[in-house]
Image (cartoon, grey):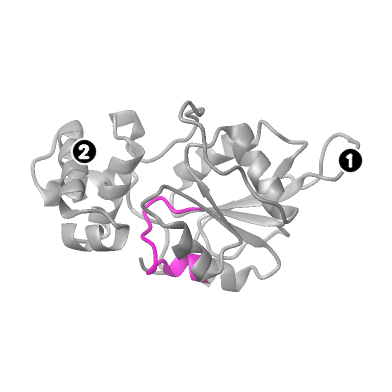
Amino acid sequence: MPSGHTTGVETNPTYEQDGPPPVRVALSNDYEIVLLGVAEMLARYPRQVRIVDITTSTRVPHAADVVLYDTFGRVPDVDVKLKEILAENPAAKVVVYSWDDYPEDAALRAGAAGFLRKGLTAAELVAALVAIHDGGQPPPEPRADGEAVQTWPGQVHGLSQREAEMLSLVVRGLTNDEIAARAYLTVNTVKTYLGTAYRKIGVGSRSQAVAWGIRHGFESTDDTGL
């Protein structure tokens, strides 16, 4: 099993409730700051979902009904980590949580039980996770005015999540052409994201951007490859 960090979360409710128990959710990603942002969203709804693990590893140590896999810093079709999460957690439904440039069909082809787009409000995300767990359909589209609760590397420096994702791939050693091909973007779009990111963090070259990224939390904890 690849190395990674796991935070166990209290698995016993501290109150009694009518109706079904909350869905047990494990959160997985390569970056702890990303996981903490998603956890903050879900923690508002303890009667519907209960977070049992927050992990950068591929195996969830506690029993989970759903593994919510945030794809920050990942690219579709060559997403080795998604394949390992699916293989190592056969009892859980794995749900991919991403943007449109990570195609839904790529997630479903790999074996994911569902795909949810970032932009859902916290309430919509919870409702979708419960629906997928129960075998139903999640909401078709997020609202444009969704709550902005997530966190990601570089956010405090003004980077958007898309800019941060592009920078994380640069730190991993991908070229612009590789990022474009694997993230289903044009090279010009990648260059635009990186250009605005470089200006915001005050660097003028790729090597400076990599050094900045390593100093500011853009090194992945994962060793399963891209």
Mark nearer the N terminus (1 vs 2): 1
Label 2 belongs to which residue?
197
Give the magenta part as a residue range. 70-83
Left or right: where 99 falls relative to 67: left
Please indicate, yes or no, whether residue 22 appears anywhere in the rendered image. Answer: yes
Q: Amino acid at mark 1?
A: Gly
Instruction: State yes or no: discs 1 and 2 in contact (Cβ < 8 Å).
Output: no
Indicate the quadrant containing the C terminus: top left, top right, bottom left or bottom right. bottom left
Q: Is residue 132 above or below residue 14?
A: below
Q: Amino acid at mark 2?
A: Ala
Left or right: where 210 falls relative to 205: right
| Residue drawn 20% across the image and 34% down it | 201
Q: Nearer the viewer, mark 1 or mark 2?
A: 1
Label 1 and label 2: CA atoms lie apart by 47 Å
Label 1 belongs to which residue?
19
Q: Is residue 124 above or below residue 136?
A: above
Rendered image quadrant of residue 170? bottom left
Is the residue marked by circle 2 packed among few (<14), some (14-19), or many (20+) residues within 10 Å?
many
Tell me the chief SS of the magenta region: loop
Can you give x and y, in whole percent of width and height, for residue 141 in the image? Answer: 52, 40
82 or 208, nearer to the observer: 82
Q: Is residue 216 above or below residue 174?
A: above
